[in-house]
Image (cartoon, grey):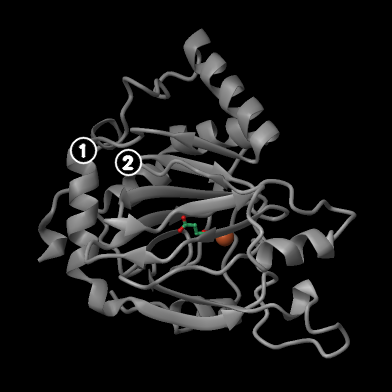
Amino acid sequence: MTQEHISLTPQEVINLNAYPIEDTSTPEYAALVERLRAELDTRQYVALPDFIRQPAREQAVAQVEGILDQANHNRSDRNCYLHRKPDPSFPSDHARNIFHSASSRMLAADLLPLSSPLKTLYYWDNMKQFVAGIVGVDRLFDNDDPMQPVNALCYMDGDRSAWHFDSTNAFTMTLMLQAPEEGGRFEMVPNTRSDDDQCYERVARVMQGDTDDAVEVGREEGALCIFRGCNSLHRVSPVEGDRLRIMGVFVYENEPGVIGDPEVNQTVYGRRTAMAV
Ligand SMILES: O=C(O)CCC(=O)C(=O)O
Ligand SMILES: [Fe+2]
């Protein structure tokens, strides 16, 4: 049933009035990219409210809700380095040995219909160019894995993510498709650590509940968010209520032809191979 939606054009998906990214040669475009790039560098995140149009958002939500039963339910206790086992060579109150539970439901790219507005957005060349400008690289490429490039990450009542650092990607891009009734706040402690200092004590304090330095990133429905999660602890607080929190998650690469590690796919999507189409 969800396959019956027709594909929308990029112009129908993206709010080009607020974000004039169709013509990349204008001064408005250059100024927009420069403003967002500077903001990302300073704060480690940048939020773009009203990035997608309402009918596109509604179509994406309806499609996700129609296939939610196929999502992979990920549940684990993990530390902020995404490890699941304690390390006895460190004390019990060390950042490596503080664990929180996480629970969420992941829909892989091969389960999302071709007509998903998430795919229209992801595969549009102007979008890649726009994001490349914001994150400060010359070019970005599609991820060629059957499961990884575009996902819908869903949180039901009680689901949450634990404080963590993202492990591989230099930046993460998400789109709030549907906000929950309560909770599900995206919280971040910018620059909790740096490339050359693990700042274990500060990290442990956040993990133990000292969140004075945390900022809440505005996540209104339709908002795009680009953040650097490698050195900034972040989490999604527990979702409350019947309304699903649905987040589109997009992965761009610095080189063409990247496909995923089967072990990672097994963990994230619960399978190694693509669904037959
Ligand atoms: O669901 C979110 O808002 C963020 C998820 C997250 O931490 C990530 O994609 O790295
Ligand atoms: Fe993350």
Occupied quadrant, residue 227: top right
Occupied quadrant, residue 22: top left
Q: Which residue is at 88% across, 56% downward?
A: 197
Q: Under tag 1, what secondary structure?
A: helix
* Count of numbered labels shown in the rendering: 2
Establish if 263 lies above or below 134. Answer: below
Q: Which residue is at 61% across, 21% downward?
A: 34
Q: Which residue is at 50% across, 43% downward?
A: 217
Asked if ligand 1 lies within 8 A of label 1, the reply is: no
Image quadrant occupied by the C terminus: bottom left
Q: Earlier in the sequence, mark 1 or mark 2?
A: 1
Q: Which residue is mark 1?
A: 54
Image quadrant occupied by the N terminus: bottom left
Q: Which residue is mark 2?
A: 222
Outermost residue toward the top in this view: 27
**Labels 1 & 2 near each other (Cβ < 8 A):** yes
Occupied quadrant, residue 263: bottom right
State the mark number for residue 72: none
Report whether residue 135 is seen. Answer: yes
Q: Position of residue 53 (x, y in %)?
A: 25, 35
Q: Residues within 10 Å of mark 2 (few under 14, many from 20)?
A: many
Q: Which residue is at 24% across, 78% downward?
A: 69
- Would residue 67 be found to the left or right of residue 210 on screen? left
Q: Residues within 10 Å of mark 1 (few under 14, many from 20)?
A: some
Q: Under tag 2, what secondary structure?
A: loop
- Would residue 208 be found to the left or right of residue 9 on screen? right
- Would residue 54 be found to the left or right of residue 270 on screen? left
The amino acid sitting under disc 2 is: Gly
Q: Position of residue 142 (x, y in %)?
A: 51, 51
Q: Position of residue 152 (x, y in %)?
A: 36, 61
